[in-house]
Amino acid sequence: MSQLERYFITQLAANYAAENVKYGDVVLDATMGNGKDTLLLSKLAGETGKTYAFDVQKLALDNTSKLIKDNCAKATLILDSHDKIDEYIDEELSFAMYNLGYLPGGDKAITTKKDISLLSIRKCMKMIKVGGMITVCLYPGHEKGLEEAVGIESYLSGKSPKDYFVLKTGNINIEKGPFLIMIKKLR
Ligand SMILES: C[S@@+](CC[C@H](N)C(=O)[O-])C[C@H]1O[C@@H](n2cnc3c(N)ncnc32)[C@H](O)[C@@H]1O
């Protein structure tokens, strides 16, 4: 997968965040990685908001912590799996980002997995307030990513359009190219 393809969907997710996150919001980065999305969310939610970020890798937490400090931002960084979000967050979320897969430049064996990601997204859909939004970047170009993308898409396709607006965006001219799912809670 080229950087351009990856960039395309993560940038779209960032655009959704920029359009929807308001000062004072409570937001979630479910996969902090190198911290780019955590920093973006933290800046958008501002001084009065709250940003929670999860990752299972200490390296991700260290990189994100440095980025947040260097930019005088603030975020609650949690070294744990995102399927435990409800154990750490006891308030409604306005926006959540999932950039699934492995840490760019890191160990490709440490990647998100279908069952865990699905459990987390299902919990997040309950924790998101009405009118709130979740973005999910998926990478079916590798084996685990394909399994995950199929599982998540299949689950979301069963949700009532009265409850959730669910939009899929991806290239139609790239086989197994990455794609973005945007979920907006309607009621
Ligand atoms: C594509 S990267 C995220 C990139 C990140 N958003 C950024 O801005 O740099 C995916 C991350 O998910 C993390 N991850 C894998 N399994 C996870 C889990 N169960 N819970 C939380 N994070 C997980 C990986 O360690 C990796 O850092």
Image (tube, rainbow, N blue to C red):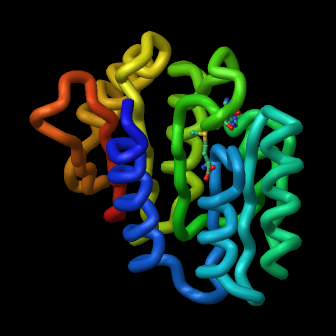
Q: Can residue 15 be seen at all in this image of the molecule?
A: yes
Vertical placement of 67 versus 85: above or below? below
Q: Nearer the viewer, residue 134 or 40?
A: 40
In the image, is 160 to the left or to the right of 187?
A: left
Q: Nearer the viewer, residue 176 or 21?
A: 176
In the image, is 16 to the left or to the right of 99?
A: left
Vertical placement of 45 versus 151: above or below? below
Task: Locate residue 40: give its quadrant.
Answer: bottom right
In the image, is 180 to the left or to the right of 75?
A: left
Q: Position of residue 173 (x, y in %)?
A: 11, 34
Ligand 1 positioned in quadrant: top right
Q: Quadrant of the N terminus?
A: top left
In the image, is 40 to the left or to the right of 169?
A: right
Which residue is pictured at 49% across the width and 49% down the height?
Answer: 125
Q: Position of residue 23 (x, y in %)?
A: 61, 88
Q: Nearer the viewer, residue 68 or 22?
A: 68
Q: Position of residue 82 (x, y in %)?
A: 69, 39
Q: Quadrant of the C terminus?
A: bottom left
Q: Can residue 130 be seen at all in this image of the molecule?
A: no
Which residue is pictured at 33% across the width and 43% down the height?
Answer: 5
Q: Position of residue 171 (x, y in %)?
A: 18, 40
Which residue is pictured at 66% across the width and 86% down the height?
Answer: 24
